Amino acid sequence: METILLEGNSKKNIRLLLEISKELGIRAKKLSSIEKEDLAIAHSIEEGRKSGHSTKEKVLKALSK
């Protein structure tokens, strides 16, 4: 499975992209601002773990505060 993220300022164009994806049989979802933040945080955590700048324990400790 392949995934792309698109961001735009035009609600009309976003709706058009969602309609086109439906016609093509591609799952698409408009993300809320909270979902975008969650995705960015998850990405940052994963990058930190891969680079050695953070560990699962450090992340969990920070989140428990």
Image (cartoon, helix red, strand yellow):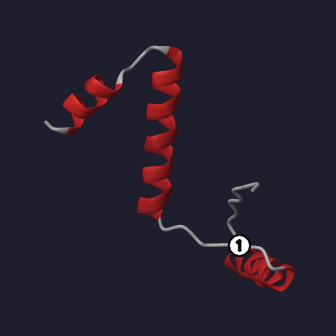
The image shows residue 45, relative to residue 11, as above or below, that is above
Kind of residue at badge 1: Ser
Q: SS at mark 1?
A: loop
Image quarter of the N terminus: bottom right
The quadrant holding residue 19 is bottom right
Q: Position of residue 53 (x, y in %)?
A: 43, 15
Instruction: Say whether residue 47 is left or right of residue 59.
Output: right
The quadrant holding residue 4 is bottom right
Q: Position of residue 33 (x, y in %)?
A: 46, 62
Q: Residue furthest top?
A: 52
Q: Position of residue 30 (x, y in %)?
A: 59, 72
Residue where numbered disc 1 is placed = 10
Residues 21 and 57: in front is 57
Residue sitting at 72 percent across and 74 percent down? 14
Q: Residue furthest front?
A: 1
Residue sitting at 16 percent across and 38 percent down? 64
Image quarter of the C terminus: top left
